[in-house]
Amino acid sequence: MALLNAKVGLVVGIANERSYAWHIAHGLIAQGARCAFAHLPGEKNERRTRRAVDELGVADPVLVPMDAGKDEDIDAAFDRYAQSFDRLDFLVHSIAYADRDWLAIGKFAQTPRQAYLAAIDISAYTLLGMARRARDLMARSGGGSIMAMSYYGAQKVVPGYNVMGVAKAALECTARYLAAELGGLKIRVNIISGGYLRTLASSAVGGVDKMEELALTKAPLRRGVEGKDVGGAAVWLASDLSAGVTGETIYVDCGINTIGV
């Protein structure tokens, strides 16, 4: 029996079939879940997301536009979701943003105020914004699982990760506070800290080649993380098997976070 039969949720952040959100959706669907998908507004963004969703084998997918930097867009996206589904069992937050001009080695101290605040807004505040909209839908169906994506650069300095590391640290802390406040409604909030994966987003970070090299040579499993690794962790978090887990940052990085040098 599939782990997620009858579970329904919203996946935010599929840019293409290489993104973590895609691999998460792939894992969820393989275990019986039904997914709706949020994408950036505009025909080009919708086409890109639709192509990626087609690769998942979803017939007639529910696609909702959302600029997460606008509260009214988040409201509209959840309203449109609720028009198609009467419950929300899981929410996947897999979006982040930082101006790539400041994601270079040696440029963190020069980060301007607006670039700093924009990174925290889109990468961290949006988790709170989406959780607020998800709360009633999840509570109505007896609880749910919210998960978001982070990276070890939130905990330790990764050259070139810069303001994104600050934003991801804020994301992880936001998840803990949400977990504490929403737990009474049986809503769990957790973070998956995935290892380096070559994606559209990660390509903007200075020093990415070094990250990949370190994973291959230093990680206890002697390999880099694969999308299906993170997808499997997401399945577990969405399922009842993780019913006692909330407020956690779970590392899915082949163990690289355990290595000191």
Image: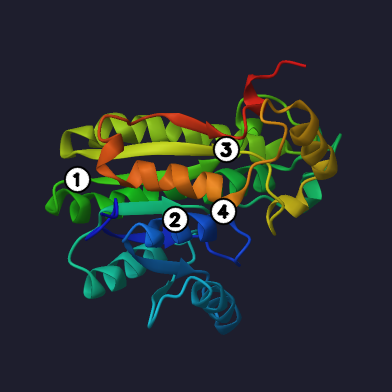
Q: Nearer the viewer, mark 3 or mark 2?
A: 2
* Residue, disc 3: 168
Tell me whether circle 1 and circle 3 mark residues in contact (CB < 8 Å): no
Q: Amino acid at mark 3?
A: Lys
Q: Residue at x 71, y 37 (%)?
A: 223
* Residue, disc 1: 143
Q: Amino acid at mark 1?
A: Gly
Report x, y in % for residue 168: 57, 37
Q: Amino acid at mark 2?
A: Gly
The foreground one among 92 and 58 is: 58
Mark 2 packing: few (<14 Cα in 10 Å), some, or many (20+)?
A: many
The foreground one among 90 and 116 is: 90
Q: Nearer the viewer, mark 4 or mark 2?
A: 2
Query: Quick one: which residue is furthest to the top in this view?
Result: 260
Look at the numbered disc 1 and give the secondary structure of its residue.
loop
Report x, y in % for residue 122: 54, 51
| Quarter containing the N terminus | bottom left
* Residue, disc 2: 27
Q: Nearer the viewer, mark 1 or mark 4?
A: 4
The answer for how far apart the CA atoms under marks 2 and 1 are is: 21 Å
The answer for how far apart the CA atoms under marks 4 and 2 are is: 11 Å
Look at the numbered disc 4 and give the secondary structure of its residue.
helix
The answer for how far apart the CA atoms under marks 1 and 3 are is: 25 Å
Tell me whether circle 1 and circle 4 mark residues in contact (CB < 8 Å): no
Report x, y in % for residue 89: 25, 53
Q: Nearer the viewer, mark 4 or mark 3?
A: 4
* Residue, disc 4: 20
Residue 57, compared with residue 174, is above or below; it is: below
Q: Nearer the viewer, mark 1 or mark 3?
A: 1
Q: Residue at x 48, y 54 (%)?
A: 24
